[in-house]
Image (cartoon, rainbow, N blue to C red):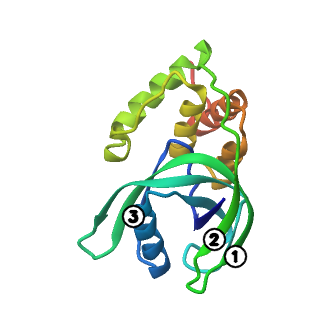
Amino acid sequence: MQVPLFPLNTVLFPGGPLPLRIFETRYVDMISERIKNDAPFGVLLIREGGETGLATTFDIGTLARIVDWYQGSDGLLGVTARGERRFRLISSHSKPDGLHIGEIEILPEESDLPLPEEYHAMATILAGVLDDLGRLYENLDRHLDDAGWVTNRFMEILPVDLEEKQLCLEQSDPAERLRLVQEVLGNVRGPISTA
């Protein structure tokens, strides 16, 4: 399968929202074509380089499909995409306009894992945080009883290094991701005082 690639300084998780402001011609054209054909594009975390120049990326990314778009008052194209399936980049080439096209392999969907009882407090915390995040999360279908969904939402909103987010994206076992998220939450919160 071939898809246009969008290297970014962000990690997109399946089911998660991705707001973008598009100004480069190659991406305006790509987004317009994707909207017209209701087709996905690939999002990959940049390993080295920048969003507007040359960049190397990680090999595991997420397909994204545009769910909303608008023309900003500054003339820039604004879009909201939603993460779909994870993929592995096999190879890529550049078109004359600089747009990267990737040959990808869709990764197997992870198995469903009901959120274990000992993690229910984590889902309650997540629900409250999502309520406070506004428009980007208000129309998102919530699956607070699903371990994979809960871990994906936590990792996309927690203030952790992009490499940690990428590691979590590459982890296809929801039980292992729960452990990773719990560890990250402990690091973000810091030690809890009992006094």
Q: Residue flagged by tag 2: what amino acid is it?
A: Ile
Q: Which x, y percent locates residue 47?
A: 70, 65
Q: Few, some or many C-alpha atoms within 10 Å of disc 3 (few <14, some 14-19, many ≥20)?
A: few
Q: Judge depth for marks 2 and 3 and give the one in front.
A: 3
Q: How many marks?
A: 3
Q: Which x, y percent locates residue 139?
A: 34, 39
Horizontal arrangement in the rendering, residue 49 relative to residue 154 (left or right): right
Horizontal arrangement in the rendering, residue 157 relative to residue 166 (left or right): left
Q: Quadrant of the rendered structure where residue 131 is?
A: top left
Q: Are marks 2 and 1 in contact (CB under 8 Å)?
A: yes
Q: Are marks 2 and 3 in contact (CB under 8 Å)?
A: no
Label 3 residue SS: helix
Which residue has dot 3 on it?
A: 36
Q: Residue at x 66, y 45 (%)?
A: 169
- Quadrant occupied by the N terminus: bottom right
Residue closer to the observer: 93 or 14? 93
Which residue has dot 2 on it?
A: 101
Q: Residue flagged by tag 1: what amino acid is it?
A: His
Distance CA(mark 1)–CA(mark 3): 23 Å
Q: Judge depth for marks 1 and 3 and give the one in front.
A: 3
Q: Which x, y percent locates residue 91?
A: 75, 67
- Quadrant occupied by the C terminus: top right
| Nearer-N-terminus badge (2/1) | 1
Distance CA(mark 2)–CA(mark 3): 18 Å
Q: Residue at x 59, y 80 (%)?
A: 53
